[in-house]
Image (cartoon, coloured by chain):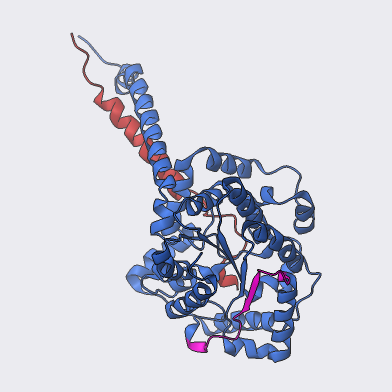
Chain colours: A blue, B red
Amino acid sequence: VAVSTPARAGEKVLDRRVAATAAVTFLLLLAFAELVSRGLSSAGALYGQISLSGVITSLPELEDRVRWGLRGQSPPVLLLGDSVLGASAMCERGQPGARRSTLPSALADRRAPVRSRVVSLAADGLVPGDLEAISYVLERTVSRLARPARVVLVVNVRMLASELDREGQRVSREFLLPALPPASRAELVPAAPRGEAIGTRLYGGAASASALFRLSQQLRTLWYYPTPADARQRLVEAVFGKPPAGDVEEAALRMRVEGFYQELWREDAPAARALRRLIPALRHADPRLLVVFSPQNPSYLEKGGPEVATANANLLRTIVGKGDTVSFVDLSAAFGEKLFLDHCHLTAEGNLRLAEEIDRRLGSHA
Amino acid sequence: VRARFPVRGVLLGALLFVVFFAVLLFAGDLSSSKFLYVDF
């Protein structure tokens, strides 16, 4: 009588042949997915169709975005900034079509007739230290491909807030650090350990080597943003609705934010110095660089009074410099309260207005 | 005798790939950002 022992039964489920076929199938699928991802990446499937403003996942992805923009028929518009350019504030308020209502999307619609791609290199919470790193990536990629580009830097009021002077607050994305020259790095992150953490290196290596990895990191941002807890909260809210914001929380945030508008910026602050360093890099990429001081909600702006607002705008103007071709546009007091979701994030209509302002200054000959 | 097509192996390989891709999509926090837009 043949009796199959548990060990022999186990062998039947996963014998050598099954394991080998499984491994080959896995590797073939991996290779196929990598090829498809490369194709999607070079076609700009995500960059062209979906606004990924609000997120940067790695340095290689950033280079990918710039390269995709430069491959278009006309010089692209490369946008640098922070959450003012993203969809998070609108998403958070449950506004439908938030990703199609961002500034980059509005500008892309306006630039479509001149076939100029609009590439957002902005992400939530970027500070001048991050922007400096991004500027070098942009400068390097543009000069390597030797194609013209228009560059627009949108400066938000909180980018120069004094709380960003503190150590540990001067750069928000550590994966951007390798793009900084040693002197900038020493000033922005003086206490950083010499070598990168193994996790950061592994992540950077995977992003650099695999288009599939980069694609997966971009795809997850479409709903998984920014943490698993937020994703769960959104699922719950889809069923039970959004809870009303607490009065105390709202008042505390308002008090904190109002502080940004009452401060006089310092020329020697680390954030101001980082801005001063990044302007030449951006000018190298686009001699006609456009720097926009982003609109601010008048109800916050008035907290600091006109003297503070003027002094800060003048400092920014000085930092940007008086090049023959570089334009500085101060839109800080240009918009009414109705175009804001909060102190600095714009409604869909506000984004349309800002896109008009930027488009007009870029002109039709990109 | 012709060898049978290894259906089980193919299915197992496909399942492994799905699990691998799900880990890429869902594991861990999204970015190393210290600041989110709500902080400002």
Which residue: 63% across, 49% down?
A140
Q: Is residue B23 visible?
A: yes
Residue A135 coordinates in the image, percent (x, y): 64, 57
Reply above or below: A322 against A72. Answer: below
Reply above or below: B31 against A345. Answer: above
Residue A60 coordinates in the image, percent (x, y): 56, 46
Residue A211 coordinates in the image, percent (x, y): 47, 42
Q: Residue furthest right?
A: A268
Q: Residue furthest left?
A: B1
Which residue: 67% across, 44% down?
A197
The residue nearer to you, when weighing A229 against A206, is A206
The residue nearer to you, when weighing A6 against A200, is A200
Residue A147 coordinates in the image, percent (x, y): 55, 51
Of helix, strand and loop, which mostly describes the magenta segment? Answer: loop
On the rendered structure, is A61 left or right of A143?
A: left
Query: Which residues fall within the magenta stretch?
Result: A320-338
Q: Quadrant of residue A208?
A: top right
